[in-house]
């Protein structure tokens, strides 16, 4: 038993040394990471300052912000019109008289009826207020697609502006060495995470061995 106790004590001592070493490495890795983050933030601030001093960049950014808000509002309006169309179009399509006049092209240049048929159609149109109904129907049928086209065109225009902003931002960031700072921060973050995992593992093993040694010593 004495040899076993001695062996456990030696293992505990080694684990304690390992734990101390990993905790020290974790502290160092944390300090290195904190310094890298600080430097990255400082360079980012310089990049932002340079960009804000570029009047063309600021104008583009303002245009992009306004365009984005306008697009969001347009997409919300489109959604509301789509819902409105889904609710109201079935009633138009279920109206036999409306569909009859609509399919015959009443009120359009393609309408060709004459004589009694034309008089009956005119009476039916007044009866259901076809002109007003058709305006509402055409609005619900055509407006969503028209809005989608406008939104798509505006989105393409916005993307062109955003790409130009990105190019300007990249040029300034590269000139200030920001990508390198970001890469360092990412690398040091991974290093610290590995140190933390190692420290946690050794700490857990150390706790288990201490518990085992305590139980063994009391038996």
Image (tube, helix red, strand yellow):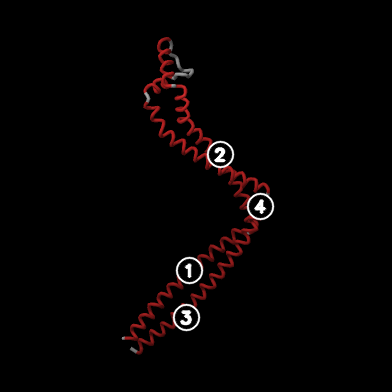
Q: Earlier in the sequence, mark 3 or mark 1?
A: 3
In whole angstroms, how far apart are the C-alphas of marks 3 and 2? Answer: 64 Å
Which residue is identified by label 1? 194
Query: 10 Å neighbourhood of mark 4: few (<14), some, or many (≥20)?
Result: some
Which residue is identified by label 3? 17
Residue 97 is left or right of residue 53, and the answer is left
Question: Please, is residue 10 above or below residue 158 in the view?
Answer: below
Q: Label 3 near label 4: C-beta < 8 Å?
A: no
Which mark's residue is nearer the viewer, 3 or 2?
Answer: 2
Residue beneath the point at 44% across and 21% down: 129
In whole angstroms, how far apart are the C-alphas of marks 1 and 4? Answer: 38 Å
Quarter of the picture containing the C terminus is bottom left
Question: Please, is residue 2 above or below residue 126 in the view?
Answer: below
Question: Please, is residue 171 above or below residue 13 in the view?
Answer: above
Q: Label 4, secondary structure: give it.
A: helix
Residue placed most toward the observer, 44 or 103: 103
Residue 97 is left or right of residue 24, and the answer is left
Q: Earlier in the sequence, mark 1 or mark 2?
A: 2
Q: Label 2 near label 1: C-beta < 8 Å?
A: no
Quarter of the picture containing the N terminus is bottom left
Residue beneath the point at 62% across and 56% down: 173
Q: Earlier in the sequence, mark 3 or mark 2?
A: 3
């Amino acid at each position: 038993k004495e040899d076993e106790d001695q062996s456990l004590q030696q293992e505990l001592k080694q684990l304690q040394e390992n734990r101390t070493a990993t905790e020290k490495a974790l502290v160092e890795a944390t300090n290195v990471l904190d310094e890298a983050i600080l430097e990255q933030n400082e360079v980012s601030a310089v990049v932002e300052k340079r960009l804000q001093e570029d009047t063309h960049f600021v104008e583009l950014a303002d245009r992009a912000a306004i365009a984005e808000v306008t697009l969001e509002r347009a997409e919300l309006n489109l959604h509301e019109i789509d819902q409105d169309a889904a609710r109201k179009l079935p009633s138009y399509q279920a109206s036999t008289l409306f569909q009859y006049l609509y399919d015959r092209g009443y009120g359009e240049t393609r309408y060709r009826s004459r004589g009694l048929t034309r008089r009956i159609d005119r009476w039916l149109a007044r009866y259901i207020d076809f002109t007003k109904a058709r305006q509402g129907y055409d609005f619900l049928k055509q407006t969503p697609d028209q809005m989608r086209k406008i939104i798509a065109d505006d989105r393409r225009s916005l993307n062109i502006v955003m790409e130009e902003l990105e190019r300007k931002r990249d040029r300034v960031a590269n000139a200030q060495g920001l990508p390198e700072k970001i890469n360092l921060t990412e690398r040091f973050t991974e290093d610290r995470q590995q140190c933390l995992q190692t420290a946690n593992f050794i700490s857990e093993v150390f706790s288990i061995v201490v518990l085992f040694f305590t139980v063994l010593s009391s038996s």
